[in-house]
Amino acid sequence: MNLHEQCLLRYLTHPDELSYNTEILKLNNKILEHRFVTKNILANVLSLNYTEGVNEG
């Protein structure tokens, strides 16, 4: 069961905790976004910079 499923199940069993569950999901999404950017975008930029530097020299 992933975090989204856990939050949904928790909401269904404790509907008064909706704001808490929403904050958990927001935090999880932010972490996933940060990992994606770090892994895919920053790695590609660093690779491009290294390749350009090697080709210039």
Image: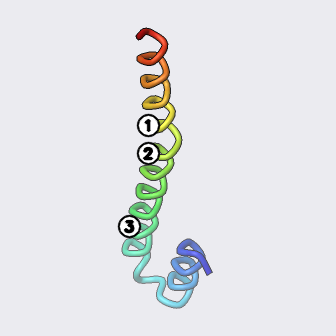
* Residue 5 point in image, percent of width and height: 60, 77
Asked if labels 1 and 2 touch by Cβ distance under 8 angstroms, the answer is: yes
> Residue at the spot x=38%, y=67% of the render?
23
How far is disc 3 from disc 2 in space, using C-alphas?
Answer: 22 Å
Q: Sort mark 3 into few (<14), some (14-19) or many (20+) by Cα contacts within 10 Å.
A: few
Q: Give the vertical position of 42 relative to 28 (above or below).
A: above
* Disc marking residue 42: 1
* Disc marking residue 38: 2
* Sequence-first disc among 1 and 3: 3
* Residue 3 point in image, percent of width and height: 53, 74
**Is 40 situated left or right of 28 in this image?**
right
Mark 1 falls on what kind of element? helix
Mark 2 falls on what kind of element? helix
> Residue at the spot x=43%, y=74% of the render?
21
Q: Residue type at mark 1? A: Leu
Question: Of all residues shown, which one is farthest toward the top?
Answer: 56
Q: Residue type at mark 3? A: Glu
The quadrant in which the N terminus is found is bottom right
Q: Give the vertical position of 10 relative to 50 (above or below).
A: below
- Front-most of 23 and 38? 38
User: Mark 1 or mark 3: which is in front?
Assistant: 1
> Residue at the spot x=41%, y=55% of the render?
30
- Front-most of 34 and 47? 47
Q: Residue type at mark 2? A: Thr
* Sequence-first disc among 3 and 2: 3
The quadrant in which the C terminus is found is top left
The residue pinned by badge 3 equals 23
How far is disc 2 from disc 1 in space, using C-alphas?
Answer: 5 Å
**Is 51 situated left or right of 9 in this image?**
left
Mark 3 falls on what kind of element? helix
- Front-most of 55 and 17? 55
How far is disc 1 from disc 3 in space, using C-alphas?
Answer: 27 Å
